[in-house]
């Protein structure tokens, strides 16, 4: 649906994007991640036609984003981090104005806007001035303008920034629902959102693609490792760490928390060895019961931090 090839963007001597290439498959929800200043906003501005690349190609549904910019932009609904709202308009007036900009025929406007307002749940606020809405509802109006014209591609830049936890959950449900009929790029610093709704992930850092692939590839442990959450029936950290230190199969471990007189650790072990048996045996020798020993997947946050840290070390 979107193909990005060897994308470069220079601002004078500043190299914002350096040979960036990745695809967004039709029907996928792509998590577009990176630290501040990594080049995410620059890449999204190029995809949406706001700025031109220094070199490279972006193809949107078969149309070159530079040579056929209008055709490409017709297929994109864009929610920037700061939605382009007009506070003196009512919600209905604003969305009708967006329909004018997108050349939505008058005969389908009412039904389209009714559907959009139902999706983002702003129907009860249609006659209110935009400036009088809360932050959460202004964000919903911004989301609504991205949906006007029913574009097959949605690009969402930090859609839940500044929202309360309840609103964040609601937005995730909306994004998941839209993902059934749209191709979506979701840029966010909240990695739980990516884990909750995305099928694929691209991480960029210092203007380059640091890693890309299916979400499952980021959260699956390496073939040579297995991860455990271990709960000991003791509150003594020294005892628990002696048990884990004595296990030859345990590569690394970290204290997680105490809970009702028990202590919980996370451990990385050699997947080829019977780590569970060794942990159980050493705990028994120390006369400490295991309340829980379960395998877990690696978190996206762990992988993200690992990639960014590795890039920083290589840069040094």
Image (cartoon, rainbow, N blue to C red):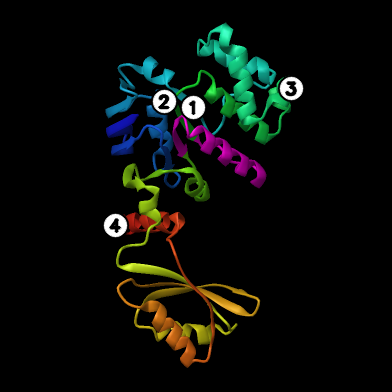
| Residue wearing tag 1 | 78
Q: Looking at the image, which is closer to me, 174 or 251?
A: 174
| Foreground disc of the pair 4, 1 | 1
Looking at the image, residue 281 sits to the left or right of residue 211; the answer is right
First reached walking from the N terminus: tag 3 or tag 1: 1
Judged from the image, the secondary structure of the residue bearing numbered disc 2 is loop
Q: Residue 206 placed where, x, y %?
A: 35, 45
Q: Which residue is situated farthest in the top direction here?
A: 106
Q: Which mark is residue 128?
A: 3
Q: CA distance from mark 3 to mark 1?
A: 23 Å
Which residue is at 58% across, 84% downward?
Answer: 234
First reached walking from the N terminus: tag 4 or tag 3: 3
Residue 15 shows in the view: no
Q: CA distance from mark 4 to mark 1?
A: 35 Å
Q: CA distance from mark 2 to mark 3?
A: 30 Å
Residue 186 shows in the view: yes
Query: Mark 2 touching mark 3, by CB under 8 A?
Result: no
Range of magenta residues: 157-186
Q: CA distance from mark 4 to mark 2?
A: 32 Å
Q: Residue 134 placed where, x, y %?
A: 71, 33
Q: Residues within 10 Å of mark 3 (few under 14, many from 20)?
A: some
User: Residue 265 colored magenta?
Assistant: no
Q: CA distance from mark 4 to mark 3?
A: 53 Å
| Residue wearing tag 2 | 48
Judged from the image, the secondary structure of the residue bearing numbered disc 1 is strand
Q: CA distance from mark 2 to mark 1?
A: 7 Å
Query: Mark 4 touching mark 1, by CB under 8 A?
Result: no
């Amino acid at each position: 649906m979107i193909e990005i090839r060897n994308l470069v963007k220079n601002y004078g001597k500043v190299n914002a994007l350096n040979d960036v290439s990745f695809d967004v498959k039709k029907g996928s929800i792509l998590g577009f991640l990176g630290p501040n200043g990594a080049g995410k906003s620059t890449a999204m501005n190029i995809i949406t036609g706001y700025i031109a690349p220094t070199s490279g190609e972006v193809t949107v549904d078969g149309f070159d984003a530079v040579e056929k910019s209008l055709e490409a932009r017709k297929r994109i609904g864009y929610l920037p981090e700061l939605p382009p709202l007009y506070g003196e308009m009512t919600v209905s007036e604003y969305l009708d104005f967006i329909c004018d900009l997108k050349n939505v025929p008058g005969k389908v406007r009412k039904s389209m806007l009714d559907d959009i307002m139902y999706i983002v749940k702003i129907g009860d606020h249609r006659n209110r001035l935009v400036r009088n809405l809360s932050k959460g509802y202004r964000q919903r109006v911004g989301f609504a303008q991205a949906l006007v014209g029913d574009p097959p591609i949605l690009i969402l830049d930090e859609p839940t920034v500044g929202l309360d936890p309840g609103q964040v959950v609601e937005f995730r449900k909306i994004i998941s629902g839209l993902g059934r009929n749209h191709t979506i790029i979701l840029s966010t610093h909240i990695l739980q959102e990516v884990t909750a709704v995305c099928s694929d992930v691209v991480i960029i850092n210092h203007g380059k693609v640091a890693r890309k692939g299916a979400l499952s590839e980021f959260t699956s442990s390496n073939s040579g490792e297995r991860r455990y959450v271990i709960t000991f029936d003791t509150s003594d950290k020294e005892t628990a760490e002696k048990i884990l230190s004595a296990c030859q199969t345990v590569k690394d471990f970290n204290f997680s928390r105490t809970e009702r007189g028990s202590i919980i650790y996370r451990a990385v072990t050699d997947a080829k060895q019977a780590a569970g048996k060794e942990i159980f045996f050493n705990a028994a020798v120390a006369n400490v019961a295991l309340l829980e020993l379960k395998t877990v997947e690696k978190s996206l946050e762990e992988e993200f931090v690992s990639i960014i840290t590795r890039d920083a070390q290589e840069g040094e």
